[in-house]
Image: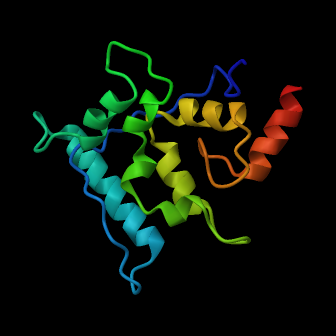
Amino acid sequence: MGSYIASDRSVAAARASGAQHRSMNPTQSLEKVADVFLSEAERAKRLNPPLCTDIWTAAAGLYGTEGEDGELAWQAEALCAQTDPEAFFPEKGGSTRDAKRVCGVCPVREECLQYAMDNDERFGIWGGLSERERRRLRKQAS
């Protein structure tokens, strides 16, 4: 199946090598947590060499190595795996803004969206799009 992302669109590469998962404090807004995560991701991207091993890159070995194209190897670089999963599966009517901000700088956004479209994912934010937005995109593509 072809790509659902226009060829003239680019996804800014971001690497969260040194970013740590943060537990949400009930008094802290999700937006503030997202801001902290994204600023740490930017700081980690500038480090040379990184302060710690990127656990998500190491986990890619479960699906394939750098030289191999494992079906789900892209998930090792997904920034959503390092943030609060609740942001990507909001309650009906809940905000998707923070999840989409993380997706906006994710290096595997295109692969994520392609996976969601190919597997007819009906819940959550995938590749920066909600289920409704993916459904609209699917209709436009056909």
Q: At which x and y percent is residue 11?
A: 51, 32
Image coloring type: rainbow
Q: Quadrant of residue 106 in the image?
A: top left
Nearer to us in this view, 101 or 58 = 58
From what the image shows, is residue 8 above or below residue 43? above
Q: Quadrant of residue 99 in the image?
A: bottom right
As drawn, the residue found furthest toward the front would be 62
Q: At which x and y percent is residue 21?
A: 30, 60
Q: Quadrant of the C terminus?
A: top right
From the viewer's perspective, tell me whether residue 16 is left or right of residue 52: right
Q: Quadrant of the N terminus?
A: top right
From the viewer's perspective, tell me whether residue 141 is left or right of residue 2: right
Q: Quadrant of residue 40 in the image?
A: bottom left
Query: For the image shown, how many numbered marks are present on the structure?
Result: 0
As drawn, the residue found furthest toward the bottom would be 27
Q: Residue at x 25, y 57 (%)?
A: 20
From the viewer's perspective, tell me whether residue 59 is left or right of residue 107: left
Q: At which x and y percent is residue 81?
A: 41, 50
Q: Residue at x 64, y 55 (%)?
A: 124
As drawn, the residue found furthest toward the top would be 67
Q: Residue at x 30, y 55 (%)?
A: 39
From the viewer's perspective, tell me whether residue 63 is left or right of residue 47: right
Q: At which x and y percent is residue 32?
A: 40, 71
Nearer to us in this view, 40 or 59 = 59
From what the image shows, is residue 117 above or below residue 130? above
From what the image shows, is residue 81 above or below residue 74? below
